[in-house]
Image (tube, rainbow, N blue to C red):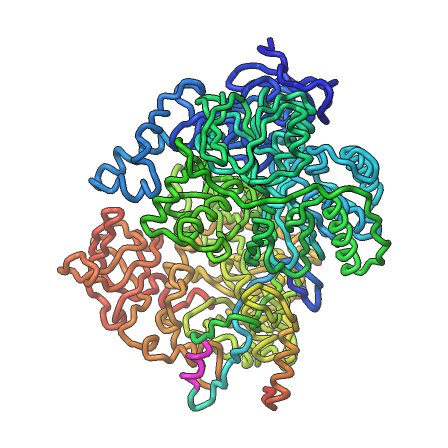
C-alpha cells in the first residue's frame, strides 16, 4: 500500500506502523462507568469489512499519527487526515477540550 | 571438442547471431549454439530431445514449450556454489561456458532405474501421500519418506553460500507496461509519445513477444523489423525505461508491482559490482498488462513423450531460433493455430505427415494448402496416443469414424487453444471469468489503475492487439495527466482464431498427463472426482495438479475442464483456482537482497565505540546496538573475573559506563508538565526546575511499559529517558498521547537519542573526577548539586553538556551528556583524568550486576506481564490524577494480592550458582507445573557479597521473607534451595547516593 501523508506525500506503507481502529475514542476516566468503558476501549473491536478508519503512524517520516480510511476488502485508501486535526475537531464538536 | 554440429539448425531463419558462436555443456557433453539462443533452442539445434526425468514416475521428458510456463525442461544450471536447480531451459539465455545438468535421473538420463516407479504407478496415484503410506505409522519417517524423497525430487540446491550479490531498487512511472508483444509495444509507444514516464518490462532478453516467433507483417514491415524500430524509438525518450530480462511476478496494492531483473544470469559470473539479480518494486500510476496468452496442450496418451511440443513453441523454434524441432510432424489441434503451424513447418522444410483437428469442418484454404503439400487431413479426429518411449516415433490417430491408424513422425505439435495470462491481473482478487466463445478464462474485475490488453485479455488477432494496445497506452497516459497525441496504429491482419473446446482424448490407451511437472494424469483427476474431491481447490490439493513450480500454467485449465466434464457442470460453474504471486519462482537471494549475514539488520554504534574497541571491549548486541559488555584486561581469562573487577572498582573508586543507547526525548511546551502527569504514573508537574525524578509509564491495559527519568530544565522544558529497548516504542506512544488523546495541549516532542553521547560516572570518587572536567564557575559540590539535581553547563573548556545526578549502580553517581560528536573525546578525557583514581570502564554486564545488587528492575522484570505493583513500585502511582493505564490497572486481576511480585533470592548454600528462568516450588513439593509459584527473572554473582543473588517473581512475596524454596531448572539440571530476601542487597538505606 501507499499512504498519502499530509506532510510528506505519497509514501510506501513500510514507513508506517499500524495501531488499529480510529473510531474508538479514549473514554473519560472520571466517568462512573470508566472501567467498563476502558475495557471496551482496550479490547473490543469490530471486524469491519469495508471502509474503516484506522490509526497509522509515520514512523520513518514526520512522526505524525494519521487517520487513514482504508477499505479492508481491497486495501484501497480512500482518505488520509492528520490525527491531531481529527481529534481537535472531535473535541470542538463535543466541547471537551481539556 | 564439440561433439556434434548443429544438425537441426535451419540455414535461412532465426533471430540468432550466427557470428557469435557459444560453447556450452549438457550433462558434461560440449555443444555449440549462438548468441540469441535459449538453452532449449540450442539443445534442439544439436538434436538433443531428452532433457530430464519426471518428478514422480521418472518418465523421459523433453521440451514442451518455449517460455516460462515450461513444466518439463528443468535443469540444474552452473555448478558449485552457483548451482541453481529447476531452471527452465526454455528461458535460460545461452552464454559461453554455460553448464547444465539434467535432473531426477539415476544413474543417468538415458538409463533411469527409478523409471520403475511407472510400473508401480497404481500406488502413486492421486492422494497417494494420504493413503498408501498411512500404515504402519512408524514406517513413515524411516522408510516411506526417505524413499519418496529419493525417488521424487527436483534438482539439488547449492550447499555453499551464494557468492553473488543481489540488489533491491524502487522505480516510479506514469505507465507500466508488462509484456512487449504487439499490444505491449503499442501501449508503451503511444504512452511514451505523450511524454509520460513509461517502464516496459519483458521476461525475455528480447522485446517483441510473439512477433519474434510468428511470420507476420506490421505496417508493411516484417514483424521483427517493426519491433526493432519501435524499441529504437522508445529508447529515444528520456522518460522511458526499458527492462528486458525482467519478470513482473506480482501485483500489490496501490499500483505497486514486484519484479525480478536477471541482471547477470546470462553471464557465467557477474562482473565486479554487478548483482546477479535485482528485485524491483515498481510504483505505477497506471499499468497495462500485456503478457499475452499461453497455449495449452490437449491431454492424450503418452502426451509427455519428448517430441510432443506446443504448436506455438514449434513456430518459435523455427522462426525465432532457426531450429527444426523435428523432421516429420503431425499437427494436432482444436483451433486455427494448427493451420498457422503447418504453414511454418512447410516453410522451414519440415515434412508434415498429417493435420489432425477435432473440428469436423476445416477452412477450405487450409485443406487446399494441405493437399498441395501432401499433408493428410483428419477432421473430427484425434491423436489418441504418442508412440515411442524416449522420443516420439509416431502418432496413433483415431479418425472421426472411430478407425485407428499409426502415422510415423518424430514431432507432434499440439494446440488446445490459448489461455490468456490472467495471473498478474487477478493477484489482487479479481476472479477470472470463463468465456465460452473463446474457450478461455479472461481477466475479471481489475484493480484501480490497471488495464489489460491484447491476448492477455482474450483479444487474439494481431491487428486487434495493436489497436487495443495503442488505445490502452493513450488512455493510461491521459489518465496520468498527459495530452493525447493520437494513436497511429500500423496496418496488420487479424489471423483466424476459431476454436472448438476440446480437452481430453478418451480413446487414449496410455497414461495421459494433465500436469506434466507434478506427474498428474487424467486417471488421477477421474479418481479424485470419484472419491469426492469435486471442488477445484480440493482437486488441486488431492492430486497436486497445478502445485508445481510452474503453477499449472499448462495444466490448470485442462484439469478444471476435465473435472467439469466429469461432474457434468459447466466450466463457469466449476470455478477457477486463484493465482497468487509469484508468477514465476523468485530466488530467495533476490528477496533477501543485501540483507544477509551481518547486513541482515543495521548495526548502531555509540559515539565512543572506536575507543571501546581500542580498549579491547567485548561487545554484545542489544537490539540494533553494539554495546560494550565488559572490558577484559590482559591476564583476565574469564568474563566473571573482569566483571567482578569492574564492579569492585565502581564500588570502591570510580567507573565509567557508556549509556548513550538510552532513549532520550525532549518534551517542551507550556503544558509539558501536565502532559507528563498523564503519561507517567507519578507526578511530574511538581518537579522543580533543576531536578530529576524516576518515573514509570503503563500501557493502557495497566501493565508496566517502560521506566526512566524525567528532568526539568525550565518550566516548559523537560527531558526524559527511556530504556534502550523501548526508545522507539515510547516515542510512538507519547506522540499518540499528544496528537490523538490530548491534541489541545501545548506540547512538542523531539527524539534526541542520537544527539547526545551519555556516560554514567559512578563511585565514591565520581565527583572528584568530574570536578576536573566541569568548567568554572559550575559548583559540583554535594550542597550545590545534590542527589537528583540536573544542570546545563560546559565541560572540557566550552563543550556544551548536561549533568544529571542519577544512580543506577547505587553509588554516588552522575550521568554526563555531551553532543554526540564529543562523546569519544569525553570518554578519553574521563579515562585520562581518572587514571589517578584507578578508573575502570564498565560494561553492560557490571551494570547489570550492580542493578541486581540494588534490586532495580530492568527488562527481565518489565516483561509485559508485570504491573507497577508487581515490580514493587505500586506506591509511586499518584491518586491525585489520571494517567494512561490507571483505570485498567485497578482491575481485580491486576490488583490481586497473590500476584507474583519482585523479591530477592539467595542460595541457602552460598557456594551454589543461581539460574535465571528457574521456577520456584515449595521446599518439599514435587517439581510439577501445578506447584509452580513463580520464577527467577535475573541473577548475578555479587562481588560485593561474595555469592550469587537473584531477583524473581514470587506469589505472595511480601509475607514470605526468610522462606526456603526450591529453584528448579530442569533445562540445566538446576535444583537449588533458595531463601526469600528483600530485593535490595547492597546499601539498603541508600546512604551512598547522597554523600
Ligand atoms: Zn509524514
Residue B847 appearing in the image: yes
Please state if B715 lies on the left or on the right of B542 as rendered.
right
Q: Main secondary structure of the magenta part?
A: helix
**Would you place residue B746 above or below residue B550 in this image?**
below
Residue at position x 62%, y 38% from top?
B362
Residue B771 appearing in the image: no
Q: Residue furthest left?
A: B924
**Would you place residue B487 above or below residue B156 in this image?**
below
Residue B525 on image: x %, y %: 39, 44
Residue at position x 80%, y 53% from top?
B196
Q: Residue furthest top?
A: B1
Residue B544 on image: x %, y %: 41, 43
Residue at position x 78%, y 45% from top?
B240
Q: Residue furthest front?
A: B401
Answer with the quarter of the image where residue B323 lies: top right
Residue B649 on image: x %, y %: 44, 51
Q: How many discs appear?
A: 0
Question: Looking at this view, is B976 or B615 the one in front?
Answer: B976
Please state if B92 lies on the left or on the right of B52 as rendered.
right
Answer with the quarter of the image where residue A77 lies: bottom right
Question: Looking at this view, is B48 or B253 the one in front?
Answer: B48
Which quadrant of the frame does ligand 1 lie within?
Answer: bottom right
| Residues rendered magenta in the picture | A34-42
Residue at position x 79%, y 39% from top?
B218
Quadrant of the drawing holding the N terminus of chain B: top right
Residue B337 on image: x %, y %: 63, 37
Asked if the stretch drawn in magenta spans residue B462, the answer is: no
Question: Looking at this view, is B479 or B14 the one in front?
Answer: B14
Question: Looking at this view, is B893 or B562 the one in front?
Answer: B562
**Would you place residue B862 above or below residue B206 in this image?**
below
Amino acid at each position: 500500500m501507499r499512504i498519502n501523508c499530509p506532510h510528506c506525500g505519497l509514501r510506501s506503507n513500510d514507513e508506517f506502523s499500524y495501531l488499529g481502529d480510529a473510531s474508538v475514542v479514549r473514554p473519560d476516566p472520571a466517568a462512573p462507568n470508566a472501567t467498563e468503558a476502558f475495557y471496551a476501549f482496550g479490547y473490543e473491536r469490530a471486524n469491519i469489512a469495508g471502509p474503516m478508519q484506522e490509526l497509522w503512524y509515520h514512523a520513518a517520516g514526520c512522526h505524525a499519527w494519521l487517520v487513514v480510511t482504508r477499505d479492508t476488502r481491497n486495501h484501497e485508501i480512500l482518505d488520509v487526515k492528520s490525527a491531531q486535526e481529527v481529534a481537535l475537531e472531535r473535541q470542538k464538536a463535543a466541547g471537551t477540550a481539556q | 571438442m564439440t561433439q556434434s554440429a548443429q544438425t537441426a539448425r535451419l540455414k535461412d531463419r532465426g533471430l540468432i547471431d550466427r557470428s557469435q558462436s557459444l560453447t556450452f555443456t549438457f550433462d558434461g557433453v560440449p555443444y555449440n549454439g549462438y548468441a540469441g539462443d535459449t538453452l532449449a533452442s540450442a539443445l534442439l539445434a544439436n538434436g538433443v530431445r531428452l532433457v530430464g526425468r519426471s518428478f514422480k514416475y521418472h518418465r523421459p521428458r523433453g521440451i514442451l514449450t518455449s517460455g516460462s510456463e515450461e513444466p518439463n525442461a528443468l535443469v540444474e544450471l552452473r555448478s558449485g556454489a552457483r548451482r541453481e536447480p529447476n531452471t527452465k531451459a526454455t528461458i535460460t539465455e545461452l552464454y559461453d561456458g554455460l553448464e547444465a545438468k539434467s535432473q531426477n535421473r539415476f544413474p543417468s538420463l538415458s538409463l533411469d532405474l527409478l523409471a520403475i516407479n511407472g510400473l508401480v504407478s497404481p500406488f502413486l496415484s492421486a492422494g497417494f501421500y494420504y493413503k498408501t503410506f498411512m500404515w504402519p505409522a512408524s514406517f513413515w519417517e524411516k522408510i516411506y519418506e526417505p524413499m519418496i524423497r529419493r525417488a521424487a525430487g527436483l534438482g539439488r540446491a547449492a550447499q555453499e553460500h551464494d557468492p553473488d550479490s543481489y540488489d533491491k531498487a524502487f522505480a516510479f512511472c506514469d505507465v507500466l507496461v508488462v509484456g512487449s508483444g504487439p499490444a505491449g509495444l503499442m501501449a508503451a509507444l503511444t504512452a511514451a509519445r505523450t511524454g509520460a514516464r513509461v517502464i516496459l518490462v519483458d521476461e525475455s532478453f528480447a522485446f517483441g513477444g510473439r512477433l519474434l516467433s510468428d511470420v507476420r507483417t506490421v505496417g508493411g514491415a516484417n514483424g521483427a523489423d517493426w519491433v526493432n524500430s519501435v524499441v529504437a524509438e522508445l529508447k529515444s525518450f528520456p522518460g522511458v525505461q526499458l527492462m528486458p530480462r525482467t519478470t513482473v511476478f506480482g501485483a500489490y496494492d496501490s499500483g505497486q508491482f514486484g519484479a525480478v531483473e536477471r541482471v547477470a544470469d546470462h553471464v557465467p559470473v557477474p562482473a565486479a559490482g554487478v548483482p546477479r539479480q535485482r528485485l524491483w518494486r515498481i510504483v505505477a500510476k497506471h499499468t497495462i498488462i500485456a503478457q499475452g496468452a499461453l497455449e495449452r496442450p490437449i491431454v492424450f496418451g503418452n502426451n509427455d513423450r519428448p517430441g510432443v511440443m506446443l504448436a506455438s513453441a514449434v513456430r518459435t523454434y523455427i522462426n525465432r531460433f532457426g531450429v527444426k524441432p523435428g523432421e516429420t510432424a503431425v499437427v494436432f489441434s482444436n483451433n486455427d493455430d494448427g493451420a498457422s503451424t503447418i504453414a511454418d513447418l512447410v516453410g522451414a522444410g519440415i515434412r508434415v505427415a498429417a493435420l489432425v483437428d477435432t473440428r469436423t469442418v476445416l477452412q477450405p484454404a487450409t485443406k487446399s494448402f494441405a493437399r498441395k503439400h501432401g499433408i493428410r487431413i483428419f477432421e473430427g479426429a484425434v491423436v489418441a496416443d504418442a508412440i515411442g518411449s524416449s522420443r516420439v516415433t509416431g502418432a496413433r490417430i483415431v479418425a472421426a469414424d472411430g478407425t485407428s491408424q499409426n502415422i510415423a513422425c518424430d514431432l507432434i505439435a499440439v494446440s488446445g487453444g490459448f489461455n490468456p495470462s490472467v495471473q498478474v491481473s487477478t493477484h489482487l482478487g479479481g476472479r477470472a471469468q470463463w468465456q465460452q466463445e473463446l474457450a478461455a478464462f479472461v481477466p475479471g474485475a481489475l484493480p484501480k489503475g490497471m488495464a489489460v490488453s491484447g491476448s492477455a485479455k482474450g483479444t487474439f488477432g494481431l491487428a486487434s492487439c495493436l489497436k487495443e494496445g495503442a488505445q490502452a497506452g493513450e488512455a493510461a497516459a491521459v489518465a496520468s495527466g498527459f495530452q493525447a497525441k493520437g494513436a497511429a496504429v500500423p496496418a496488420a491482419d487479424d489471423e483466424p482464431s476459431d476454436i472448438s473446446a476440446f480437452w481430453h482424448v478418451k480413446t487414449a490407451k496410455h497414461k495421459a498427463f494433465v500436469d506434466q511437472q507434478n506427474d498428474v494424469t487424467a486417471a488421477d483427476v477421474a479418481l479424485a472426482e470419484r472419491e469426492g474431491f469435486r471442488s477445484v481447490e480440493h482437486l488441486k490439493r488431492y492430486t497436486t495438479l497445478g502445485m508445481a513450480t510452474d503453477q499449472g500454467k499448462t495444466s490448470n485449465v485442462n484439469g478444471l475442464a476435465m473435472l467439469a466434464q466429469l461432474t457434468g457442470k459447466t466450466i463457469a460453474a466449476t470455478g477457477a483456482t486463484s493465482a497468487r504471486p509469484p508468477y514465476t519462482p523468485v530466488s530467495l537471494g533476490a528477496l533477501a537482497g543485501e540483507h544477509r549475514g551481518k547486513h541482515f539488520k543495521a548495526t548502531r554504534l555509540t559515539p565512543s565505540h572506536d575507543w571501546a574497541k581500542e580498549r579491547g571491549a567485548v561487545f554484545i548486541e542489544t537490539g540494533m546496538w553494539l554495546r560494550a559488555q565488559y572490558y577484559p584486561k590482559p591476564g583476565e581469562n574469564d568474563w566473571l573475573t573482569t566483571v567482578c573487577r569492574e564492579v569492585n572498582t565502581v564500588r570502591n573508586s570510580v567507573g565509567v559506563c557508556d549509556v548513550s543507547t538510552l532513549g532520550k526525548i525532549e518534551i517542551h511546551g507550556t503544558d509539558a508538565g501536565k502532559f507528563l502527569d498523564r503519561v507517567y504514573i507519578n507526578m511530574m508537574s511538581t518537579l522543580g526546575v533543576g531536578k530529576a525524578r524516576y518515573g514509570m509509564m503503563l500501557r493502557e491495559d495497566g501493565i508496566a511499559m517502560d521506566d526512566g527519568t524525567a528532568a526539568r530544565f525550565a518550566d516548559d522544558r523537560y527531558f526524559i529517558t527511556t530504556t534502550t529497548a523501548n526508545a522507539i516504542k515510547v516515542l510512538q506512544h507519547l506522540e499518540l498521547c499528544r496528537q490523538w488523546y490530548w491534541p489541545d495541549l501545548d506540547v512538542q516532542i523531539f527524539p534526541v537519542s542520537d544527539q547526545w553521547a551519555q556516560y554514567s560516572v559512578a563511585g565514591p570518587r565520581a565527583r572528584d573526577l568530574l570536578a576536573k572536567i566541569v568548567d568554572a564557575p559550575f559548583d559540583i559540590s554535594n550542597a550545590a548539586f545534590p542527589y537528583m539535581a540536573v544542570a546545563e553547563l560546559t565541560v572540557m573548556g566550552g563543550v556544551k553538556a548536561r549533568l544529571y545526578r542519577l544512580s543506577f549502580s547505587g553509588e554516588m553517581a552522575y550521568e554526563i551528556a555531551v553532543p554526540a560528536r564529543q562523546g569519544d573525546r569525553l570518554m578519553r578525557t574521563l579515562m585520562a583524568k581518572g587514571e589517578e583514581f584507578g578508573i575502570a570502564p564498565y560494561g553492560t554486564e557490571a551494570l547489570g550486576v550492580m542493578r541486581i545488587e540494588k534490586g532495580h528492575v530492568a527488562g527481565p522484570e518489565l516483561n509485559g506481564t508485570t504491573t507497577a505493583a508487581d515490580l514493587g513500585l505500586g506506591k509511586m502511582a499518584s491518586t491525585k490524577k489520571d494517567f494512561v493505564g490507571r483505570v485498567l490497572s485497578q482491575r481485580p486481576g491486576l490488583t490481586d494480592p497473590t500476584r507474583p511480585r519482585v523479591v530477592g533470592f539467595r542460595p541457602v548454600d552460598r557456594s551454589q550458582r543461581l539460574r535465571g528462568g528457574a521456577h520456584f516450588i515449595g521446599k518439599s513439593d514435587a517439581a510439577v507445573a501445578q506447584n509452580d509459584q513463580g520464577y527467577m527473572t535475573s541473577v548475578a554473582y555479587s562481588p560485593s557479597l561474595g555469592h550469587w543473588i537473584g531477583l524473581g517473581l514470587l506469589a505472595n512475596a511480601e509475607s514470605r521473607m526468610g522462606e526456603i524454596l526450591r529453584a528448579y531448572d530442569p533445562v540445566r539440571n538446576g535444583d537449588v534451595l533458595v531463601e526469600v530476601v528483600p530485593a535490595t542487597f547492597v546499601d539498603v538505606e541508600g546512604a551512598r547516593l547522597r554523600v
